[in-house]
Amino acid sequence: MGYIELNVLNNQSSLAMGIDLGTTNSLAAVWRDGRPVILHPEGKSGSVPSVVHFPADGSQPKVGREGRDHAAAAPERTLFSVKRLMGRPAADVQGELARIPFPTSEGDDGVLRLNIDGREFTPQELSALILNRVHDHGCRALNDEKPDRVVITVPAYFDDAQRQATRDAARFAGLDVLRIVNEPTAACLAYGLDQEKSGNVVVYDFGGGTFDVSVLSIADGVFKVLSTAGDTHLGGDDFDAALVGLIVEGLAGELSEEELKDPGFLTAARLSAERCKHALSKDPQAELHMVLAARGVTFHRTVTRAEFEALIEPLIERTIDSCRRALSDAGLAPDEVNEVVMVGGSTRVPAVNAAVESFFGRIPHTELNPDEVVALGAAVQAHILIGGSRDMLLLDVIPLSLGLETVGGAVSKLVMRNSTIPCSVTEGFTTYADNQTGIDFHVVQGEREMVSDCRTLAKFQLKGIPPMPAGMARVAVRFHVDADGLLTVSAREESTGASTRVEVEPMSGLSDEEVERMLLSSVEHAEEDFAVRRAADLITEIGTMRTATERSLDGVREHLDRETLEDIEEALKAAEEATSADAERLQALRDELERATLPLAALLMDDVAKAALSGKRLEDV
Ligand code: AMP
């Protein structure tokens, strides 16, 4: 009787699946409609945590997201990072064994065994559980078509034993391995670099817990790994740890040393740190915020991007040292590298990107999602191996974001840069003024925050909106970019069905150099754009608050005492100046208006409550 149930497949599918079997997360992709696509069942992420949890009641192991969910409560029954053990004798993985919560031994064949509840498992068997889960997850996105032929990726530095162990894992999972492919090669395939005649490529892969750099040469579509370097224990987790350090430092006076080392505290601190880190990848500053409800302690601190960059600089420098080493091992100088490809979530940190760009003296490829690029490449390889052709250009992504002008001259981006096409996005908009019967739409392209810094693509008007108070109209705006890159923007008012549309070719008249210039200018102006955007948003918010206050005051003026009334009127008068002041001043005006109108809000709430109690309908209040 098998303790573990695996689905063994038998129906031959016309598809072949690419699987990125990762240390932390795994992903599956297939070739569909002329391009590789990540498989994710509707509404779910494609990523499957590479985690196996063994329930204490001896029931079937929980794998993937379910396994990870159990990890917090029972870490002593949960296995992470099985990939680090694959195909390695016990003697080589002593460091890794320290964090494995089960007893281990070495079999007569030299293969590591984990003793779990009296049963022995090899890393291959555990990895098979993960592969099976990823495969199932992917098949659900294929309406249960089950392609059992797969391509699995492994790090370029994996030796024969590690590759064989991966093959064995796939066999245990009932999968037919078409090929084991190097992760950096897959990343190059995803970018279509196999179509280059010759050249050298560097793949910089910076994930959550590991850093790898590989130097490859291409000759007539065939990749050869020239060298690899890296650090198996360096990743985004170390960036998080640097921010956790700030929390620990800040709470040192309030919590005891033991409390600061408590695993629950550290997990919460790591989560706050990661949130803050992600925000810092797009904003010049972010909040590091943590509440310890049980202790009544709150930690709050603003971290600027510059501060964060200073903290992580030595870590980034270590990755550049590895790049230097890999290049020297390959016998190449930085200027002999033709392409640099970015892989792994940590390459989203702008300082990482900047360091790589400056070291190699060229802009690295970041057009594809760095978490997906390896799985996408595995799908390309799988497609080629079953005889498919890949005539279609892989890089069909939108190079510059597409959006609409909103009140105050700010841009609301609907289709983000690097979205693969075809794609559609629908967002709701409303009217700004009372009885507004038309809306002017201004479609723009670019990465900057304000319309004046973006490129105008089209202007059009939606008419026929029935007169109603500001903010009541419901207008759905849809951006659709078809496979040829043609953008259709349509707007529809929901109550009357009034609609209009416009078609534009976003890339017409734009050269590659102009696209690059627009991208660079968004990076250069990020900080100042943030301030201008904040000011524009505050001006809009103050405008809305003023209208609402003036309207509400009319009905209840006589119920407010003189002092409050004067206070509100003073704040309203001051707010009139909110047209072009700087963001700090605008924030002060907004806050003052909010403070002054608090008694008014309380009074209105009171009226609502009384009306409700006397059986009046709220709308009649
Ligand atoms: P991977 O192992 O490739 O999935 O990478 C995961 C790592 O990427 C984790 O440390 C994440 O916190 C990090 N990561 C993901 N998104 C971002 C982001 N937007 N900014 C900074 N780090 C990120």
Image (cartoon, rainbow, N blue to C red):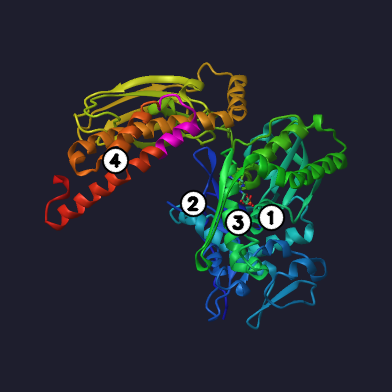
Quarter of the figure that contains the N terminus: bottom right
Q: Secondary structure at mark 4?
A: helix
In reply to whether residue 590 is colored magenta, the answer given is: yes
Query: Mark 1 near ligand 1 (CB under 8 Å)?
Result: yes
Query: Mark 3 near ligand 1 (CB under 8 Å)?
Result: yes
Q: Residue 488: tell me if it is visible.
A: no
Q: Of label 3 and label 1, which has the lower sequence position?
A: 3
Tell us which disc is closer to us: 4 or 2.
Answer: 4
Q: Amino acid at mark 3?
A: Asn
**Which region of the structure is painted magenta?**
578-591
Q: Mark 4 to mark 3: distance in Å?
A: 61 Å
Q: Secondary structure at mark 2?
A: loop
The residue that disc 1 covers is 209
Percent x, y for residue 267? 60, 63
Q: Of label 2 and label 1, which has the lower sequence position?
A: 2
Q: Mark 2 to mark 1: distance in Å?
A: 24 Å
Q: Of label 3 and label 2, which has the lower sequence position?
A: 3
Q: Amino acid at mark 2?
A: His
* Contact flag, marks 1 and 4 (Cβ < 8 Å): no
Q: Nearer the viewer, residue 480 or 401?
A: 401
Direction from residue 615 to residue 280 in the image, left or right: right
The residue that disc 4 covers is 563
> Residue extending furthest bottom?
118
Q: Mark 4 to mark 2: distance in Å?
A: 60 Å
At label 2, counting other C-alpha atoms closer than 10 Å, the crowd grade (few under 14, some 14-19, many 20 or more) is many
Tell us which disc is closer to us: 2 or 1.
Answer: 1
Direction from residue 235 to residue 318 in the image, left or right: right
* Contact flag, marks 4 and 2 (Cβ < 8 Å): no
The residue that disc 3 covers is 25
Tell us which disc is closer to us: 3 or 1.
Answer: 1
Residue 577 in the image: above or below residue 568:
above
